[in-house]
Image (cartoon, grey):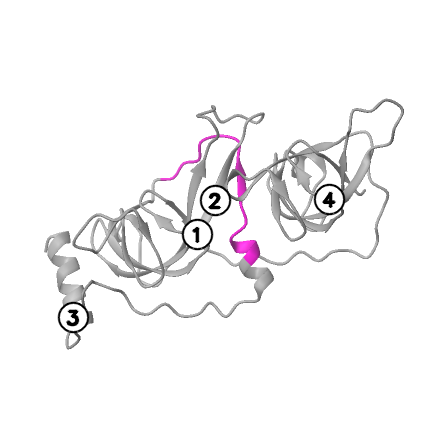
């Protein structure tokens, strides 16, 4: 059976007895997850090099080409049973954002946006159909897939050591490459586990106004929610003013 016939047969069986104007998947089930877990699952990540992303969204099940999809849409992924894909598997859908076509380096990292997550509904040898479980953004053709696992909300210690003043990190970017943040927002930090950071690590955020003989301005506080060896995702917990790319980040340790 060809992949095209495979998809048609599955859809005909699923939609038998109903009158429809477009091919739709099973109705999306509410995630029923705490708001803080959903927020963490949708948080951005940093990429210091181009990630290896062979699994991708390659299309939808419409009579015309659509670039963006939402819950309830059926989407096609470029792998099937020959690649170990099975019905019921779940994947994050993510895409790489780069500013001004910069080369991705530790000094100019890219942002990985989580657009949502999907669940495999039907599998062919080399392609599969999936439904969108949750959308953080529009799910687009060419978004790549990564295995799905719910994040754990970090536990913040009530102990607040003094912030280190001799090894500042820097605020990078956030969701959609945004560069300004407030309480509850997520941003990327150019420090990770190689610099003594772990999930739940706490930070103080400062601004250097480049004013001689003046203290740094205490902007607020943040906590690490995702950590890799070279970078971290932080969530702002206290904001006394808008936090911006380039502001200083001091680890409480």
Mark 1 or mark 2, which is nearer to you?
1
Q: Quadrant of the C terminus?
A: top right
CA distance separating discs 1 and 4: 27 Å
Q: Is residue 192 left or right of residue 140?
A: right
Q: Around disc 4, counting alpha carbons within 10 Å, would you say few (fewer than 14), some (14 to 19), or many (20 or more)? A: few
- Residue 214 in the image: above or below residue 152: above
Q: Residue furthest right?
A: 213
Circle 3 — which element? Answer: helix
Residue 232 in view here:
no
The quarter of the image holding the N terminus is: bottom left
> Which of marks 4 and 1 precedes in the sequence?
1
Identify which residue is drawn at 56% across, 57% down.
Answer: 39
Which residue, given by chain and number where applicable, does mark 4 sit on?
241
Q: Nearer the viewer, residue 197 or 14?
A: 14
Comparing marks 3 and 2, which lies closer to the viewer? Answer: 2
Say which label, 4 or 3, has the lower sequence index.
3
Residue topped by disc 3 = 13
Q: Nearer the viewer, mark 2 or mark 4?
A: 4
Would you say the residues marked 1 and 2 are in contact, meaning their CB atoms lie under 8 Å apart?
A: yes
Instruction: Look at 32% across and 42% down and name the residue there.
Output: 142
Could you tell whether 160 is left or right of 228 in the image?
right
Q: Give the x, y percent position of residue 111.
A: 51, 38
Contact between marks 3 and 2 (CB within 8 A): the answer is no
Query: Residue 137 — which label?
Result: 1
Magenta span covers which residues? 39-53
First of labels 1, 2 by sequence position: 2
Mark 1 or mark 4: which is in front? 4
- Going from N to C along the chain, the mark reached first, 3 or 2, is 3
């Amino acid at each position: 059976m060809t992949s095209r016939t495979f998809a048609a047969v599955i859809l005909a069986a699923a939609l038998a007895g109903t009158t429809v104007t477009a091919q739709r998947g099973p109705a999306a089930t509410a995630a029923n997850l705490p708001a803080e877990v959903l927020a963490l699952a949708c948080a951005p990540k940093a990429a210091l090099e181009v990630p290896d992303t062979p699994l991708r969204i390659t299309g939808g099940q419409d009579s015309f080409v659509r670039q963006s999809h939402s819950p309830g849409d059926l989407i096609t992924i470029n792998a099937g049973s020959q690649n170990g894909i099975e019905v019921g598997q779940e994947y994050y859908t993510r895409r790489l954002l780069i500013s001004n076509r910069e080369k991705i380096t530790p000094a100019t990292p890219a942002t990985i946006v989580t657009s949502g997550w999907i669940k495999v509904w039907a599998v062919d040898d080399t392609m599969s159909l999936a439904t969108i479980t949750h959308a953080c953004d529009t799910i687009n053709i060419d978004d790549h897939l990564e295995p799905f696992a719910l994040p754990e909300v970090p536990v913040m210690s009530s102990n607040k050591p003094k912030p280190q003043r001799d090894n500042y990190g820097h605020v990078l970017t956030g969701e959609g490459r945004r560069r300004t943040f407030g309480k509850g927002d997520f941003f990327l930090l150019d420090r990770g586990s190689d610099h003594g950071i772990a999930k739940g690590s706490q930070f103080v955020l400062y601004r250097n106004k480049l004013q001689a003989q003046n203290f740094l301005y205490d902007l607020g506080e943040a906590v690490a929610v995702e950590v890799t060896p070279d970078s971290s995702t932080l969530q702002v917990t206290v904001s006394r003013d808008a936090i911006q790319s380039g502001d200083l980040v001091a680890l409480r340790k």
